[in-house]
Image (tube, grey):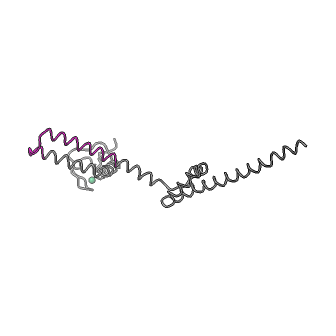
Amino acid sequence: MTSATKYCPECGRELPAEARFCTGCGTGFTTVAETPEPIVAPASEQQAAQNTSPEVTALSIELQRLSDLLESGSITQETYESSKAQALATFANARQQANASAAVQQAAAAPDTGGFGWAALGFFFPMVGLILYLVWKDDRPITAKAAGKGALIGVIVSVVLSVLLGILSAVLPLIIMNSYY
Ligand SMILES: [Zn+2]
């Protein structure tokens, strides 16, 4: 135990334990906060604000509307329950879609760092490297170039190798035959 202080749950300001309200943001206290959470409180607050997505807002509005209808007697308990279940299902669906599109956005926002991996992929699969280059050349130019360069090197190497093999297959028999005479 450090001293007789507490932290404002709203803004994190350190206050005397007996304070009735926060001198920083004016929040009134009904209970004395024993556990100090100075930095965590604002951060989790921020997160809560981020978590309030349009789907959550839509769901809470719909649930409020349904309970209002039930209270006013406009719908039966049964209708209320089924509508609520439907709203929750719609919410789950929307949430899933939002998560999926967030994942796609995150993938699209992946850092454009190029990298040996993409070059190697282009090297071994020049067609894939070429396609990646064409797809990414505007959005991720560095990575696109890495894949494209890998593809180019891959093509050059395979051409050179096939030429060498061609020469070898023409020359080798001559060498072998010459060694017989
Ligand atoms: Zn405060």
Is residue 153 or residue 54 the one in the foreground? 153
Give the extent of the magenta segment: 69-97
Is residue 22 or residue 173 the one in the foreground? 173
**Left or right, residue 12 beside residue 170:** left
Examine the rendered structure and indicate whether residue 114 appears above or below residue 66. below
The secondary structure that dominates the magenta segment is helix
Residue at position x 20%, y 50% from top?
61
Q: Position of residue 166 (x, y in %)?
A: 74, 50
Is residue 171 or residue 69 the one in the foreground? 171
Q: Position of residue 20 (x, y in %)?
A: 21, 50
Residue reaching furthest to the right: 181
Q: Is residue 75 magenta?
A: yes
Residue reaching furthest to the bottom: 138
**Quarter of the image containing the N terminus?**
top left
**Quarter of the image containing the C terminus?**
top right
Residue reaching furthest to the left: 73
Q: Residue 36's quadrant in the figure?
A: top left
Residue at position x 85%, y 44% from top?
177
Q: Is residue 54 magenta?
A: no
Q: Position of residue 19 (x, y in %)?
A: 23, 50
**Left or right, residue 136 beside residue 178:** left
**Left or right, residue 81 beside residue 33:** left
